[in-house]
Amino acid sequence: MNVSIDLVFKIAAIGILVAVLYQLLVRSGREDIATMVSIAGLVVVLLMVVDLVGQLFESVKQVFGLY
């Protein structure tokens, strides 16, 4: 299992994009949509991280022979 730096850059890019969209929407008076955009960004990043955690658990099971 080798986590590349690409994942960190993807998460950072999503964070920057969500922050810019949030600020644009708040300044245009669309706070409700801005909140939804931030929640959607959080969900996307969490899905990426959950996949990695699943891979980590599989690696731990293989290392300790817990099948």
Image: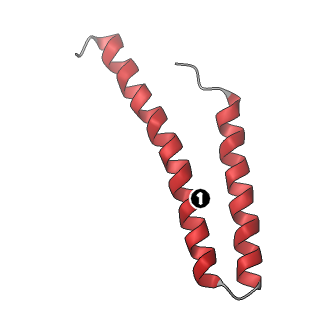
Residue count near mark 1 (Cα–Cα under 10 Å), binned few <14, some 14–19, many ≥20: some
Q: How far across and how far down the image is residue 28, in percent?
A: 76, 85
Left/right placement of residue 2 relative to residue 16 reads: left
The residue located at (58%, 20%) in the rendering is: 2
Figure colour scheme: secondary structure
Q: Residue furthest bottom?
A: 29
- Report which residue position mark 1 lands on: 41
Q: Quadrant of residue 36?
A: bottom right
The residue located at (30%, 12%) in the rendering is: 64
Left/right placement of residue 35 relative to residue 62 reads: right
The residue located at (65%, 46%) in the rendering is: 11
The foreground one among 1 and 30 is: 30
Left/right placement of residue 67 relative to residue 60 reads: left
Q: How far across and how far down the image is residue 17, in percent?
A: 73, 58
Number of numbered tags placed on the structure image:
1
In the depicted structure, whether residue 43 falls above or below residue 3: below
In the depicted structure, whether residue 36 falls above or below residue 12: below
Q: Quadrant of residue 19?
A: bottom right
In the depicted structure, whether residue 31 falls above or below residue 51: below
Q: How far across and how far down the image is residue 9, in percent?
A: 72, 40
Which residue type does callout 1 highlight? Gly
Left/right placement of residue 64 relative to residue 55 reads: left
The foreground one among 60 and 54 is: 54
**Element on which disc 1 rests:** helix
The foreground one among 14 and 61 is: 14
> In which quadrant is the C terminus drawn?
top left
Q: How far across and how far down the image is residue 5, in percent?
A: 70, 30
